[in-house]
Amino acid sequence: MHEDDSDGKTLYGYLLNEVRSMRKDREDIVDLVVRFILENDSNSVNKLTEYLRKKILD
């Protein structure tokens, strides 16, 4: 049975366990996720760029 993870806590727990098994700490999660997105999904980067641009300029 899968829990509702609308707040992302379950995903964060999985990611934290994975980085710790790699002898890294929770601060490294952001670096790993950003590197993955940059290397694998340029469309998401473009959407994120546009979102941040709107938030900054509004």
Image (spheres, grey):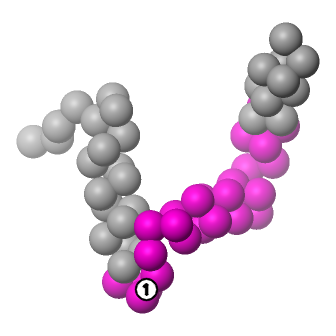
Q: Which quadrant holds residue 36?
A: bottom right
Question: Please, which residue is most extreme toward the bottom here?
Answer: 23
Q: Which quadrant holds residue 3?
A: top left
Q: Report the span colored magenta.
A: 21-47
The image position of residue 1, as x and y in percent, is 9, 42
14 displayed left or right of 36: left
Q: Is residue 25 visible?
A: yes
45 displayed left or right of 27: right
Is residue 41 shown in magenta?
yes
The image position of residue 27, as x and y in percent, is 52, 67
| Relative vertical location of residue 27 with respect to residue 53 in this rendering, above or below | below
The image position of residue 40, as x and y in percent, is 72, 58
Q: Nearer the viewer, residue 57 or 23?
A: 57
Amino acid carrying label 1: it is Met
Count of all numbered marks drawn on residues in the image: 1
Q: Residue at x 83, y 35 (%)?
A: 49
Image quadrant containing the C terminus = top right
Residue where numbered disc 1 is placed = 22
The image position of residue 13, as x and y in percent, is 30, 57
Secondary structure of the residue carrying tag 1 is loop
